[in-house]
C-alpha cells in the first residue's frame, strides 16, 4: 500500500555530483543500484542526468534523462516511419530523425507506488522540455519494462514497434506537441 503524499512538500531537483543517496528501494535491484551507485558516474561522463523527487529529505522517486532521437530504424519498416511522419508533421518535414529526450531510468520507491507520483514526474518531464526548449525536442522516449507498459500507456505513450521481440522492454514514445496542445486547450483566461 502506498504512503500518501503531501505534494506541497515535494521537490524535484537535479542530483548534485556530490550528493549521495543512502537508501532507495523500488523493488528492482537494477534500478536501485543505479541511483545508489551508478547515477553520478553517468553524470560525470556526460551520459545522463538524474533528477530526484523528495519529500523533505527522503528520495521517493527518481528519473534519469539523456538525449535521443526518433528515426527510421525505430520502426518496423520505412512505410511505418512514413506513416508516423505524415501523421505528426504538417508539410511532412523530410528528415530522417527527430530530436527526443530518453527516460533512461525511472523508479518510484515501493512505499509510494500507486500514489500518483509517477504521473506527476512524467508531466514534469514533459513540461520541462516544453518550457524554454533550448535545443528542440519533439519526443520523449523510453525503453519500458514490460510490467511498466500499462503505466506508460495510461500516460499517453505509444509503442514504436508493437511487435518488438525484446523479452524485457518495449520502445515507447510521447509526442510533446500533443502535450503542448493539451496545455493550451486547458488555459483558463
Image (cartoon, rainbow, N blue to C red):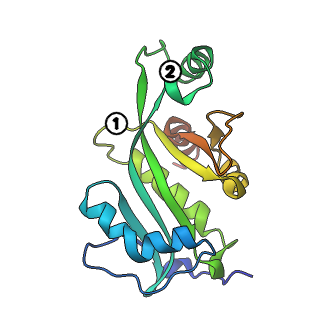
Residue drawn at x 48%, y 14% is: 92
* Residue 25 visible to an observer of this rendering: yes
**Is residue 94 shown above or below 130?**
above
Residue drawn at x 35%, y 56% is: 48
Report the number of numbered marks: 2
Horizontal and vertical percent position of residue 118: 59, 64
Residue drawn at x 56%, y 63% is: 120
> Residue 26, which numbered label?
none
Q: Nearer the viewer, residue 91 or 50?
A: 50
Q: Nearer the viewer, residue 74 or 10?
A: 74
Residue carrying label 2: 89
Q: CA distance from mark 2 to mark 1?
A: 15 Å
Horizontal and vertical percent position of residue 65: 41, 55
Element on which disc 1 rests: loop
Q: Nearer the viewer, residue 43 or 133?
A: 43
**Is residue 33 shown above or below 9?**
above
**Is residue 39 shown above or below 3?**
above
Q: Residues within 10 Å of mark 2 (few under 14, many from 20)?
A: few
Residue carrying label 1: 136
In this picture, residue 151 sits left or right of residue 11: right
Q: Residues within 10 Å of mark 1 (few under 14, many from 20)?
A: few
Q: Quadrant of residue 138?
A: top left
Query: Which numbered disc, 2 or 1, marks the residue that appears first in the sequence?
Result: 2
Image quadrant in which the N terminus is located: bottom right
Q: Quadrant of residue 76?
A: top right
Horizontal and vertical percent position of residue 93: 43, 16
Element on which disc 2 rests: loop
* Residue 11 visible to an observer of this rendering: no
In this picture, residue 136 sits left or right of residue 177: left
In this picture, residue 186 sits left or right of residue 58: right
Horizontal and vertical percent position of residue 173: 56, 40
Amino acid at each position: 500500500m502506498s504512503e500518501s503524499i503531501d505534494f506541497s512538500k515535494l521537490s524535484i531537483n537535479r542530483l548534485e555530483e556530490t550528493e549521495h543517496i543512502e537508501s532507495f528501494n523500488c523493488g528492482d535491484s537494477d534500478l536501485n543500484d543505479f541511483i545508489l551507485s551508478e547515477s553520478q558516474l553517468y553524470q560525470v561522463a556526460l551520459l545522463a542526468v538524474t533528477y530526484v523527487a523528495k519529500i523533505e529529505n527522503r528520495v521517493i522517486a527518481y528519473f534519469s534523462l539523456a538525449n535521443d532521437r526518433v528515426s527510421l530504424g525505430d520502426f518496423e519498416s520505412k512505410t511505418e516511419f512514413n506513416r508516423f511522419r505524415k501523421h505528426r508533421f504538417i508539410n511532412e518535414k523530410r528528415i530522417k530523425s527527430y530530436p527526443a529526450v530518453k527516460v533512461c531510468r525511472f523508479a518510484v520507491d515501493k512505499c509510494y507506488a500507486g500514489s500518483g507520483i509517477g504521473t506527476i514526474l512524467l508531466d514534469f518531464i514533459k513540461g520541462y522540455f516544453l518550457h524554454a526548449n533550448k535545443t528542440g525536442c519533439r519526443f520523449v522516449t523510453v525503453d519500458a519494462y514490460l510490467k511498466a507498459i500499462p503505466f506508460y500507456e495510461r500516460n499517453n505513450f505509444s509503442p514504436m514497434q508493437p511487435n518488438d521481440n525484446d523479452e524485457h522492454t518495449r520502445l515507447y514514445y510521447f509526442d510533446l506537441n500533443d502535450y503542448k496542445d493539451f496545455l493550451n486547450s486547458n488555459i483558463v483566461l
